[in-house]
Image (tube, rainbow, N blue to C red):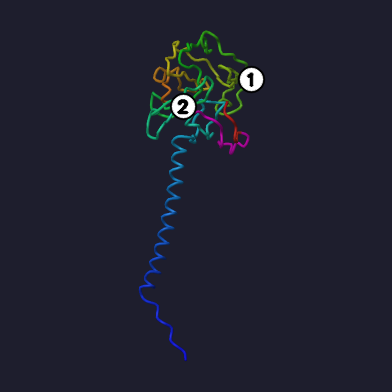
Amino acid sequence: MSTAPEPVPSSSRARSLSDVEESRWERIVANMKTIGGAVLLALVIRTCLFEAFEIEGPSMEPTLLNGDRVVVSKFSFGLFLPLRDHAELTWSSPNVGDVVIIKSPADGVDIVKRVIGVGGDFIEMRNDRVYRNGQPLPLKDMGACETGIGSLQPECRVFESQVGDRNFLMSKARGSPDPMPVHVPEGHIYVLGDHRDHSNDSRNPMVGAIPINRIKGRALSIYWSSGPEGFRWKRMLHKII
């Protein structure tokens, strides 16, 4: 004798639907936590560790060209938060020869320059040549400028120079008036652009010696480079020296 199956209580069906909804909500919450964690990690990396900058203008030729994009280490010298014009904390200073990103004291614009002097140094220029603590920075003529705006100036020359233990290339096409000598105060740096003709740097009294708490970071390498001639493959992943 067959018997009819016992009906499933409505309360059991209700609990089953509730379990499904609860499981769905748990998945949504888990996904939101993953997304939130990824966003938080990206903010921490950009705020405290690394940031990308695009080079605009010729002031660092031939080291950096207009259109280069560089990776900057933001944790090298301090904690520089977004929308601020100075670091909240500083824990170290750059070395002479470092290429750094600075929040300009003149107009608050991010600028990229090379450190020529640090606290305690005496910087002067004689006949357009840089002297650090009474010693001229060496200059070796390497030939005509072949890149950037310098390539459009027949008189532009590239020179190999050195500050501290850092060798680097700089360029210029003409001389410029010698600025006033400067004793760099402690906690400050003196910076110059590698292309002396087109650089708003410490020679400008409105910029002058720059407090280290206005340094946003140290430029490490070029990760992308493009210009009117197209993509510059040879500059890809080029270390900045």
Q: Dot 1: few (<14), some (14–19), or many (≥20) neighbours within 10 Å? A: few
The furthest residue to the top: 134
**Please, what is the three-letter code of the amino acid marked with disc 1?**
Met
127 w.r.t. 100: above or below: above
Q: Nearer the viewer, residue 154 or 45?
A: 45
Q: Whole-percent x and y of residue 27?
A: 44, 58
Q: Nearer the viewer, residue 178 or 238?
A: 238
Q: Dot 2: few (<14), some (14–19), or many (≥20) neighbours within 10 Å? A: many
The majority secondary structure of the magenta stretch comes to strand
User: Magenta segment range?
Assistant: 217-234
13 in magenta? no
The furthest residue to the front: 1
The furthest residue to the left: 11
Q: Secondary structure at mark 1?
A: strand
Q: Whole-percent x and y of residue 161?
A: 59, 17
Residue topped by disc 2: 77
